[in-house]
Image (cartoon, rainbow, N blue to C red):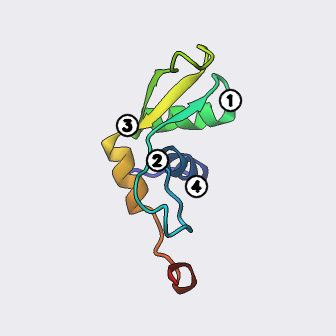
Amino acid sequence: MTHISAPQLQLLWHTLGLSPSDPHKRTVSRNHFLTGPGDEDARQLDVLVSAGLMIVGKAPAFCPQDEVVYRATREGERLAIEKLPPLSSTEVA
């Protein structure tokens, strides 16, 4: 099993449009995270790339070209969904 830190898991959830507390954001709705090189998020995302949970791509043409797009791999998506905690009864209602 792959172990990642809580901040890395939050970044993976954000990449996929997931939320551990929002019942309306429990399925993947996107798959991208745009950030600048050297940013703390980029450093954390690079760890996820090394773990095989993310891949790196080129920024879209309308973005500054020194920015980087990260996308979750299928394994990253599987792990992110698996790590979503059960909703509490107040969140489900």
The residue identified by callout 3 is 52
Q: Position of residue 67 (x, y in %)?
A: 60, 21
Q: Residue furthest left?
A: 74
Query: Please, is residue 1 above or below residue 57 in the view?
Result: below
Mark whose residue sits in front, 3 or 1: 1
**Residue 85 in sight here:** yes
**Residue 1 in sight here:** no
Residue drawn at point x = 53 percent, y = 81 percent: 88
Dots 3, 2 in contact, CB < 8 A: no
The residue identified by callout 2 is 16
Dot 4 falls on a residue whose secondary structure is helix
Q: Position of residue 45 (x, y in %)?
A: 54, 36
Query: Please, is residue 82 above or below residue 78 in the view?
Result: below
Q: Which mark is residue 14?
A: none
Residue drawn at point x = 46 percent, y = 64 percent: 84
Give the residue type at disc 4: Ala
Dot 1 falls on a residue whose secondary structure is loop
Which of the 4 quarters of the picture holds residue 75? top left
The residue identified by callout 4 is 6
The residue identified by callout 1 is 39
Dots 2, 1 in contact, CB < 8 A: no
Depth order, front residue of 76/21: 21
Depth order, front residue of 90/53: 90
Q: CA distance from mark 3 to mark 1?
A: 20 Å
